Amino acid sequence: MRYLDPKNDLTFKKVFGQHPHLLKSFLNAMLPLPEGEYIESLEYLPAELVPQIPLLKYSIVDVRCKDNKGRQFIVEMQMFWTDSFKHRIVFNAAKTYVMQLDKAEKFHSLQPVYALCLVNEIFEPQLEQFYHHYQIVHVEDMKKQLEGLEFVFIELPKFKAQNVSEKKLQVLWLRYLTEIKDGTVLVNEALLQTPEIKEALDFIQESAFSKGELETYDRYWDSVRCEKTLYYDAEYKGRAEGRAEGRAEGRAEGRAEGRAEGEKIGFLKTLLYTLRKRKSIKEVTNFADIPLETVEKLANLLKKYGDKAEEHLDEI
């Protein structure tokens, strides 16, 4: 029996986006809810349109819901980290909070919004803990809080079960997300003995998916890998070339222009690299969120100059 990775868009939504009782168990285990205020029932909400992060369309998976008390919950699975994510989730949660209110309601009717972000990368390397809980609190008296918005960020790579036989549900759900990989065959007995986890495991058995679904599953990983390549290569090359040109100018204006030009050249080189990997023009356009005309010009450069296409980027 083989399992698929539960962090994939397809599997994550199949488990947590289609089975509210599993999502309820997961949220009750993960969120810092007040004692006696656990979620009793959930209903799903449609995903809202929020600003896209350039180049990163596929590596964010989200599920939205609200409980019987009206509290709303946003769950995001983020495959890799950029500083833009934190701003995006704050915007997303704040927008969700505000949109509860229409003309017929009063401010006191607003219910809390919880944002849970599961991040498959380390973004706080200087901190040992993997669980980060944010509230709006008084600077001098941390016990005083403005209620309404709370955020939890979990760095999955940092999580290590202190005791592999521990039955605490939060530990078991995190083990489910971190120990089950693509092609996993053997699963720890502690996970199989927990009804909710066992059910979630059943849903991600490879045999439970059609051929078309498995192709979608693989395409998701291809998209994430491509996004990572585009993002990190553009960032690295752009900064390096921008600094070099900026230093050559020797003036503030020159440095600014150098960085901008360097970032552009680095980004275009990354797109050429992606086209060389036999990605179609349409795929690159979708991944990078740039005009089709630009990608077509790059493809023509590649066809015309081959390995020396980078030397002719000034023609774009």
Image (cartoon, grey):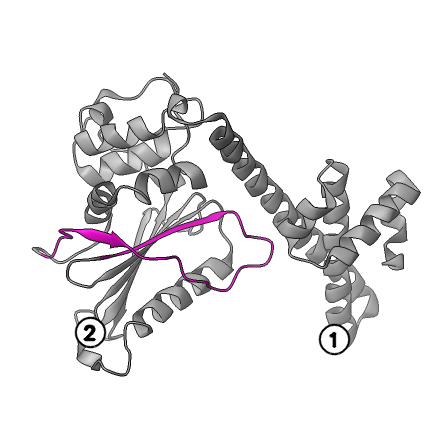
The image quadrant where one finds the N terminus is top left
Image quarter in which the C terminus is found: bottom right
> Which secondary structure, mark 2?
loop
Q: Residue at x 21, y 25 (%)?
A: 190
Front residue of 50/142: it is 50
Please give the count of numbered marks on the rendered protein.
Answer: 2
Identify residue type, mark 2. Answer: Asp
Q: Is residue 273 left or right of residue 287?
A: right
Over which residues does the magenta segment extend? 37-66
Q: Residue at x 81, y 50 (%)?
A: 298
- The image quadrant that residue 45 belongs to is bottom left
Q: Main secondary structure of the magenta part?
A: loop
Residue 303 is tagged as none
Q: Position of residue 4 (x, y in %)?
A: 41, 28
Residue 252's mark? 1
Residue 95 percent location from the top left of the image: 37, 70
Q: CA distance from mark 2 to mark 1?
A: 43 Å
Give, as a three-letter code, the residue at label 1.
Ala
| 184 magenta-colored | no
Residue 74, compared with residue 27, is above or below; it is below
| Residue at the far left in the pictured view | 36
- 214 shown above or below 49: above
Where residue 89 sits: x, y (%)?
A: 40, 61
Q: Nearer the viewer, residue 141 or 133?
A: 133
Q: Which residue is mark 2?
A: 141
Along the horizontal axis of the image, is 311 left or right of 60? right
